[in-house]
Image (cartoon, rainbow, N blue to C red):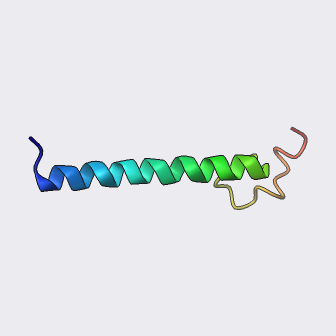
Amino acid sequence: MFNTATWIAIIAIVLIVFFAVRYIYKEKKKGTKCIGCPYADSCQKHKNC
């Protein structure tokens, strides 16, 4: 039904989504408010939230 290239692409997309969700979950569990922001710990904009 699918050729090899299609299976590789599907597996790659699933892995990327899995690791992205896992990263977001771990960061939220640590209490990071601005995930991906290099100044998340010292950000004045979200310090009062």
Instruction: Give me the residue at 50% from left, 54% from top.
Output: 19
Q: In this orientation, which residue lies closer to the viewer: 38 or 10?
A: 10
Q: Image point 84% across, 58% down: which residue?
A: 42
Quarter of the image that includes the N terminus: top left
Which residue extends farthest bottom? 38
Q: Is residue 32 left or right of residue 11?
A: right
25 sits left or right of 19 in the view: right
Which quarter of the figure is the C terminus placed in?
Answer: top right
Q: Nearer the viewer, residue 39 or 19?
A: 19
Image position, residue 31 (x, y; %):
79, 48
Q: Position of residue 10 (x, y in %)?
A: 27, 48
Compared across the picture, whether 28 is left or right of 12 comes to right
**Can residue 32 be seen?**
no
Q: How many marks?
A: 0
Q: Position of residue 9 (x, y in %)?
A: 25, 52
Residue found 91% across the figure and 41% down from its top: 48
The picture places residue 8, in percent across and down from the top left corner, at 23, 56
Residue at figure coordinates x 35%, y 49% from the top left: 13
